[in-house]
Amino acid sequence: MKGKIKVLSLLLALAMVASMFVACKQEKKASGDASSSAGKREEVNLIWYHWGDKPKQPDAVIAELNKMSKEAIQTTVDFRFTTGDDQKLKTIMSTGGEFDIAFTCAWFANYVVAAQNNQLADLTEKLPKVAPKLWEYIPENCWAGAKVNGKIYAVPTYKDSAATQYWTANKEYVIDGAKAEAEFKATGKALSTVTPLLEKVKKYHDESKTAYPHDLTAPFNYNWAGLNGHNNGWDTLGLDNVRVGIKLGNNNTKVTTLYDDADYINDLKTLKSWYDNGLVNKGASEVEKEFEFQVVGTGQGWEGCEAIWGSGKDYSIVLNKKYGPIYSTNSIQGSMNGISPNSKKIDRALQYIEYMNTNKDYRNTLGYGIKGTNWKLNDQGQVENLTKDAWQPGMFAQASFFELYPLKPAPANMYTNLKAVNDAAEASPLVGFVPKVDTLQTEIAACQAVMDKQYKYLQTGNVKDVDATVNKIKADVKAAGMDKIIAELQKQVDEFLKAK
């Protein structure tokens, strides 16, 4: 009798295990995410809100991309290109609209806000399990900088993640025409170091009657946003529009406003002198669109990126370093791709992000188009464009740079060198710190409203008196609650550093 009972018990146990196995399979099938199945899987199509304007000739390239990803990971993509206005994407994210992947960052579709408002899926536990190759591929510094309240809600683009800012110039006009190579090489972090360059370029224009190229009206041209990289050397704690942060260097961790810093004020005064002396375009504070072409300019980049910036232009670009490289939360969050928490294909979306970051053939097709049609690889390991502007998708917003072949005339080892720069770069002590501002919303909104009234005028130099304007701003933000913001941020910074 005991033997029969034991046999019966064993049969019942086996039946329970079998039923649990079937239930598990059914549950996985019901979830719509078959990412962990072996071999060929059910094909899925993902909606990706990709940054940038729609390329001029996208259809053939997208068909080739989908052919590649379908064969490799049984996944195709519906590319939805977003323009410079992120309001549409913000609305989709905030209302639970349909998407699987979306470009988000510190300055577009506000990553931190989206994460804190549960508009992006928490990937923290999934990354090492679902996308282990990606988890190992992107360095720890970048994952740390992607965290919001200790969780990862988007995959950072592994590129020039340790930011370096450069001054740029139209070589043919500035170096060859104005003979201003010495002045260009003398530029540095302080804006005053650029003044002699702009003055020489303007003198060349005025005396030789040689028009600025592309209908530009001054040696330096920008829109209402003003000087790109104006806050180089600051960790603005994700609150750039409030002009508050920590000035980097000398292990400083004191929270203050940028308007309390003498170097920053001197730069604002230089901007005013540029405006007053015709070194920048008049009416810049009312210009909406960024300028496609430049005489002298500035941007975040790396040695060799001038080839990319110069692609499709009728002049060569030269660089001179302004600042960096340094890792900060802002620089790491400068390009990211997150996943909708409402997607039924979260795992597959994450595996697609892994694929586009780590598969060399797919990454170069994603960046340059179809090999043999849009581009070819020369004997030096450089990409040569065959169709120029047919496929220009905004490569910085896609995936890692370190699987890309460099674009001619950049050297074949450009990305290898960039990776070495990243590896050796200094890091802000606050990488990974994101303030909790739910108790400061009223004060932040009030201070931002103050900044919004004057920002575009200060940043373009279009003010009567810098000191008077800054003093008025400081008085207004103090009344709006800036002291409370600084005190709370300092408390959180101190707690973050103590816990490291």
Image: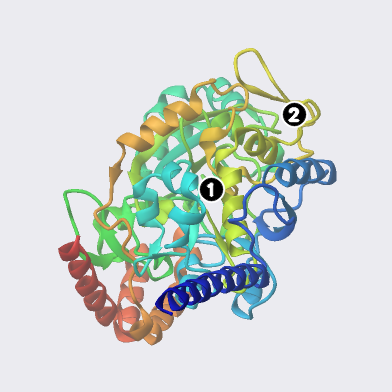
Q: Amino acid at mark 1?
A: Val
Residue at coordinates 81% horizontally, 29% vertically from top-left? 373
The residue beneath circle 1 is: 280
Viewport quadrant of the C terminus: bottom left
The image quadrant of residue 50 is: bottom right
Q: Nearer the viewer, residue 278 or 6?
A: 6
Name the residue furthest top: 379
CB within 8 Å, label 2 to label 1: no
Provide the secondary structure element on which disc 1 rests: loop
Residue at coordinates 48% horizontally, 51% vertically from top-left? 228
Provide the secondary structure element on which disc 2 rests: loop
Q: Residues within 10 Å of mark 2 (few under 14, many from 20)?
A: some
In this rendering, does residue 221 appear at all?
no
Q: Nearer the viewer, residue 306 or 342?
A: 342
- Which of disc 1 and disc 2 is earlier in sequence? 1
The residue beneath circle 2 is: 371
* Image coordinates for residue 288, horizontal then vertical, percent: 64, 61
Q: Amino acid at mark 2?
A: Lys
Tell me: residue 239, above or below residue 175: below
Position of 324 with respect to 309 (left or right) is left
Q: Nearer the viewer, residue 493 or 260?
A: 493
Tell me: residue 317, above or below residue 74: above
